[in-house]
Image: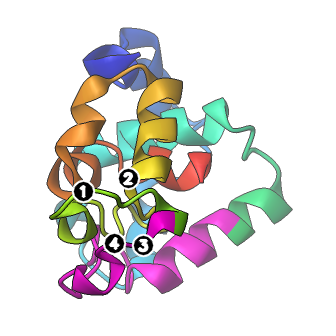
Amino acid sequence: MGQNFWTHKKVEKALFQTDALVTRKQLAYIWNCNESLIKDQELIELYKCLRTFDITTQPRLRHFISQCSHESNGGRWMKEIASGNDYEGRKDLGNTQTGDGPKYKGAGFIQVTGRYNYQQFANYIKDPKVMNGVDYVSQTYPFTVSGYW
């Protein structure tokens, strides 16, 4: 999947048609922000995430969007605010190397945490750059990692 995960033209076209599961206007209303703050790339990734993980019924959409919205303060936080130092050495998260805590702190709207979980997501999405850590995942896959998690 990698970089082509959300750039497929069919996904882009479907997103901006009336069959989009969540519109920019709806998401802006939920997040209490101006529509202009929501980037096309974010909507494309959201749409792909919803289809990939079969988040297509009203109850599933409501739960997923509300959980993402709550944990990210209305889409404002795509990565954990804390430093991640509390995760350092946490073998239950797979954090076995020095620096793993901050590198693999919570990423995405529903924050996946830990080297092990990042590796599982990297394997699923077939994008080894996921292992670059929190900044890459939070900027590239904020919805998808949440749907996966």
Q: Amino acid at mark 1?
A: Gln
* Residue 66 x, y percent position in the rendering: 61, 76
Residue 119 vertical placement versus 78 (above, below): above
Residue 112 has which mark?
none
Q: Looking at the figure, which quarter contains the C terminus? A: bottom right
**Residue placed most toward the observer, 17 or 94:** 94
Q: Are marks 2 and 3 in contact (CB under 8 Å)?
A: no
Lower position in the chain sequence, tag 4 or tag 2: 4
Residue on which the image places disc 4? 89
Q: How is the image coloured?
A: rainbow
The answer to which image quadrant residue 141 occupies is top left
Q: CA distance from mark 4 to mark 1?
A: 7 Å
Please give the residue where the numbered disc 3 appears in the rendered image.
90
Nearer to us in this view, 62 or 145: 145
Which residue lies under the disc numbered 1?
Answer: 97
Q: How many marks?
A: 4
Amino acid, disc 4? Gly
Determine whether label 4 and label 3 are within 8 Å by CB: yes
Amino acid at dot 3: Arg
Query: Does 17 appear above or below 117?
Result: above
The kind of secondary structure element at disc 3 is loop
Q: Quadrant of residue 24?
A: bottom left
Instruction: Note whether 128 is above or below 83 in the view shown.
Output: above
Region of the chain picked out in magenta, as a range? 64-91
Which mark is in front, 4 or 2? 4
User: Is label 2 or label 3 in front?
Assistant: 3
